[in-house]
Image (spheres, rainbow, N blue to C red):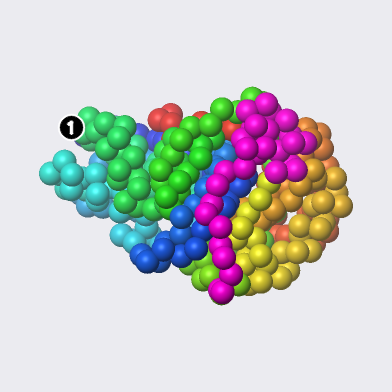
Amino acid sequence: MTTTTSITVRVPAKVNVQLAVGAARPDGFHDLANVFLAVGLYDEVTATPADTLRITAEGHDVDRIPLDRTNLAARAAELLAARHGIEPNVHLHIRKDIPVAGGMAGGSADAAGALLACDTLWSTGASRSELLDICAELGSDVPFSLVGGAALGRGRGELLTPLPVGGTFHWVFAVADGGLSTPAVYGEFDRLTAGTDVPEPEAAPALLAALESGDATALAAALANDLQPAALSLRPSLSATLEAGTAAGALAALVSGSGPTTAFLAKDAEAAGQVARELLASGTCRQVRVAGSPAAGATVL
């Protein structure tokens, strides 16, 4: 095993360009057709040999993430170590740049980053399929954080099929004050859809075609998030942010995942800059971030 070096892994945020949600399953999860797109906002996870498992962090809103073994990054190290009969003695340092609790899979990204960093540091020789199995055990979004690019997630999101992307898409993300609990948003989805016939989730052919062709206008017309009504019900102020971004010239606007970050698709980099400036000036969000997609998955630097 490697014992004398540090390994740093960069891992991207994601946006759900389609999130189709089925009815609640007996296990409490929901079947999904979740079209993931990795975007160029990154966390970095550095793994260094240590006498025990330790987590530290720096960057945006790190006071809002746990620095104990409840952190998904710590759990990733523990699961990998257990499979290979070693102690998870590692210092994991997380440099945060993905919004915390923002519907952009920041915690999942850290888990995938820690898993790849520890695998490399410890020279476990884990196969890609083993790493993906561990990712799925950690959470529904973690496998995509490892893979990146674009993919359709089935099941609860962990069963991935890579998707072709024919160009670069330009995004603006508006970061709201505070977070939204993913379980709370799904619970509100269940409340809002109670007594209705929730259809089986399916990826929209027009959206998949827009991704493959790289056509931003066509993608804008197909963006969809079944959790958006629930997120807006719990956080009505997000409606003003969506309206401000659209008024600023975005091709389309939607809540990112379970929110509260909102995502705006722009026609090009110049338009994205204009949308970002006007969104920030609108006073409807705490900060804005501009990023392109697709982005590579977890990568050793």
Is residue 48 visible to us here?
no
Instruction: Indicate left or right for 188 with 142 as reference.
Output: right
Instruction: Indicate left or right for 16 with 52 as reference.
Output: right
Q: Which residue lies under the disc numbered 1?
A: 1
Query: Looking at the picture, does residue 93 appear above or below residue 271?
Result: below
Give the magenta-colored segment's residue range: 193-222
In this orientation, which residue lies closer to the viewer: 79 or 18? Answer: 18
- Percent across and percent down for residue 79 are 24, 49
In this orientation, which residue lies closer to the viewer: 201 or 153? Answer: 201
Q: Residue at x 69, y 53 (%)?
A: 254
Spot the residue most to the left: 85
- Percent across and percent down for residue 241 are 76, 60
Is residue 203 visible to us here?
yes
Q: Residue at x 85, y 45 (%)?
A: 249
Q: Residue at x 24, y 51 (%)?
A: 78
- Percent across and percent down for residue 209 are 65, 32
Q: Quadrant of the C terminus?
A: top left
Instruction: Indicate left or right for 142 with 204 as reference.
Output: left
Spot the residue most to the front: 197
- Percent across and percent down for residue 268 are 78, 32
Does 210 lie within the magenta span? yes
Query: Looking at the picture, does residue 146 appear above or below residue 190?
Result: above
